[in-house]
Image: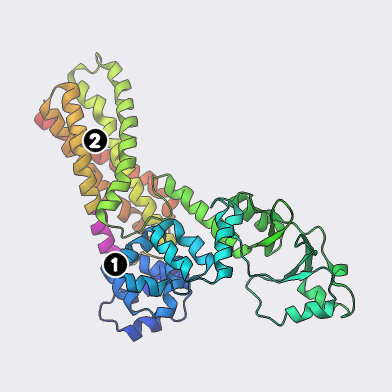
Amino acid sequence: MQNNIAELVDTLIDEDLSKKDINRAISDLEPEEVALALESLPLDQRMQVWDTIKEEDRLEIFVELRGEARKLILRELSEEHIELLFKEMEADDLLEIDDTLPDKLVDIALKRMSKKQQEYYQQASTYDDDEVGHWINHDILIASQNIRVSEALRLLKKDIAEYSDVIYLVNRTGRWTGCVKFHSLIAAQPHINISELMIEDYPSLVASTDVVQSAEAVERSGYIALPIIDENQTLLGRFDIGSAMEVLRETSEGQLMSTAGLNEESDLFAPVKRSARTRGLWLGLNLLTAFLASAFIGLFEATLQQVVALAVLMPVVASMGGIAGSQTLTLIVRGLALGQITRSNLLSLLNKELRVGGLNGIVWALVIGFISAWWFESFVLGIVIGLAIIANIIVAALSGVLIPVLLDKLNIDPALSGSVILTTVTDIVGFVAFLGLGTLLLL
């Protein structure tokens, strides 16, 4: 999949491609692969490609996009195009994306659904999105436990959904009683009652169970799907292995991104101001811990009397560069793992990250410079640390992009070693810039 995405990005980034060429390039790919490729393009080119995708293919691709990427595309679409996009949306699709949609668009999607799909959506909405009941798959084969095998075999002539290998049995009140494997039905005598083939100890999930725990339960069960029931044992639907693996992947990715103050919905080519604002909040929190460390160093003021201000503020410069670099590094490592980063889009991505670094560098240089000048009653010291902060955050952005890319080229895992190298670079640059400027302007 990674190679497919990289090849597709290189193809799509060619601005001379015709609509026919683009549709030929994506025709054999899954919607999630096309979505990843779109996220790998700068916004202008992303919309050019989006406009060439066949109308009937757009919804599936749109649902597979990350939340931030969906918002950016919606912002560029007219109301007419949005209504066309939502024309055939089903409950499962809307549940997947409703947290990134305005209420107005959710209402539009609901009005265009069948009554059955509206019921599915309302039922799922009674559960929080961290409960498995929110993610019920209703596409299942259900039969009464009292029918014969011959009657059950007729169900197998219908269109069978992906990850299906059992018929779910219920009693006359709709309560789940067990499951029967397809292969057991095929091998059985037609006249016997289907309940004789039932697996009575088949595991199930209660709808209010945490979705991550449910995904892990499916993974451990050895079955490709588990039934979801409510507190009264009523069968609501199922949770299949495909959905379980997606939940576990998103959880793992979310944990990785959260270590840098980001989330799994972050877009590689999100607008500079939005990226700077999101990361700036994390930089601000980090600033508090950095000044706390500086305050403890200040306890040794008598020992460091000649250079006390420089010694006290050194951790601030180093840590601000470190956290800024780790944010970029985390985003790039994810992009490399998914095959989103290629030679074709590397310069655009580097340009965007340098602009984010420059904007955050200037904002936080002003904040830190003012605090330092007030703390030590030295305007020149404020200028020194401000310039050092700008230099270190820009170098951190540059390093956060180039270090993982170079490590990946050398077949070294950037997720394991990238942060170590990045921290070393930002520490050295921060100290040299800060102490060098301090030597020139203060001593």
Type of the residue with mark 2: Phe
The magenta segment: 345-354
Type of the residue with mark 1: Glu
The crowd level at tag 2 (other Cα within 10 Å; few <14, some 14-19, many 20+) is: some
Q: Residue 434: where, in percent of width, then height?
A: 19, 34
Q: Front-most of 119 and 205?
A: 119
State the residue at coordinates (25%, 63%): 348
Q: Residue 281: where, in percent of width, then height?
A: 32, 41
State the residue at coordinates (42%, 50%): 263
**Helix, strand or loop at disc 1?**
helix
Q: Front-most of 275 and 160?
A: 160
Q: Is residue 346 magenta?
A: yes
Find residue 407 and report its image quarter: bottom left
Residue bearing mark 2: 431
Residue bearing mark 1: 76
Asked whether residue 65 appears in the rendered view, the answer is no
Marks 1 and 2 in Cβ contact (< 8 Å): no
Q: Nearer the viewer, mark 1 or mark 2?
A: 1
Which of the two discs, 1 and 2, labels the residue nearer the N terminus? 1
Give the quadrant of the C terminus.
top left
Rendered position, 330 above or below 348: above
Report whether 387 appears left or right of 241: left
Q: Residue 52: where, in percent of width, then height?
A: 33, 79
Find residue 380 and report its image quarter: top left
Report whether 89 appears left or right of 382: right
State the residue at coordinates (16%, 27%): 373
Q: Front-most of 87 and 195?
A: 87
**Helix, strand or loop at disc 2?**
helix
Q: Front-most of 423 and 201?
A: 201
